[in-house]
Image (cartoon, grey):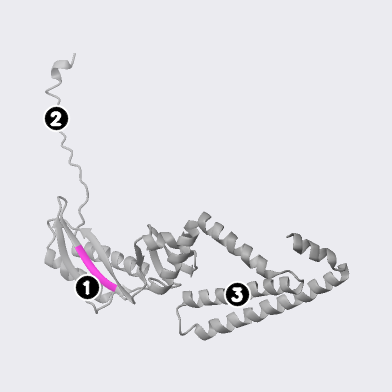
Amino acid sequence: MESILQYIDSLHPLELLIRILSALVMVFIIIVVFNVIQLVTGKLLKKRLSPQRTFMIRKGIKYTGFVMGMLFLFKSIGIDTTALLGAAGVVGIAVGFAAQTSVSSFISGLFLLSEKPFQVGDAIIVDNILGVVLSVDLLSVKIRTFDNLYVRIPNETIFKSNVTTLTRFPIRRMDLIFSVTYQADLEQVRDVLMDIAAKDPYALDNPAPLFRVDQFERSGPVIIFNVWFDKNFVLETKTSMFMAIKKRFDEEHIEFPYQKVDIRVSDTSDSIDGFKE
């Protein structure tokens, strides 16, 4: 710092100003050029690489341009960048020890980019957090939940957690679980459910729906009905199926079990006669 200050003092103020202005112009040009490069690279790699890899390459090009611009600025005004790079290396080591969590997230981010468990736009579940992936950075993954909340999850947490990608495959299976009374004819229940699935606009015919009786509870048999659907119509499929089941069960006189309370009323007038005056 002393040598830098001595060098600045040795320059005429006008000469220093001219050097700084010319250096800033060149820095601006360098940053603009690298921004153009990262935009062109992003368009060229859009169809060849995944969105998160393209995003990281663009970020790397942009940061490289910024660093080169700063180095050029220091060099133009006569500051020895060798000493600055050496000091930056020492500071980097100290910061690395002090920010082990960030370093761990950085390394985890590299593994996530190579493993690709999900992509930008996928719906995932991490630690009971359900949302759509907005970006995959080197330190964290940004998610927008379905109730429109912004959630940042460190890569280290994702790397150590069980991650469920809901939209990895084009179709999904929905498990509809409910009970019927013991008076219901299970064969009739099966036929009604199969007919509902065949007529539902969101349920797929292939793979075919599956009907099974899971267990017998005190209130009645537990039915599990599996239907396959397009991954983009989760709520539509669930709502459509449940509405159709309720309507058809009412028409077919198939009842769902519900808690009942029987109250027996008895004549107690004789038992309390002795207490009357």
Q: Residue 220, can we see it? A: yes
Label 1 vs label 2: CA separation?
55 Å
Give the number of the disc on residue 155: none
Q: Which region shows up in magenta?
A: 224-228
Q: Main secondary structure of the magenta part?
A: strand
Q: Say whether residue 194 is left or right of residue 20.
A: left
User: Which sits earlier in the primary sequence, circle 1 or circle 3?
Assistant: 3
Q: Which residue is mark 3?
A: 64
Q: Regarding mark 2 in the picture, which secondary structure is present there?
A: loop
Give me the C-alpha separation between circle 1 and circle 3. 54 Å
Q: CA distance from mark 3 to mark 2?
A: 93 Å
Q: Position of residue 85 (x, y in %)?
A: 63, 67
Residue 88 lies in the magenta stretch: no
Circle nearer the viewer, 1 or 2: 1
Q: Position of residue 215 (x, y in %)?
A: 14, 57
Residue placed under numbered mark 1 in the picture? 209
The picture places residue 264, in percent across and down from the top left corner, at 15, 37
Residue 267 badge: 2
Q: Is residue 144 found left or right of 203 in the rendered image?
A: right
Quarter holding residue 109: bottom left
Q: Tell me what residue is drawn at x 35 percent, y 69 percent.
A: 166
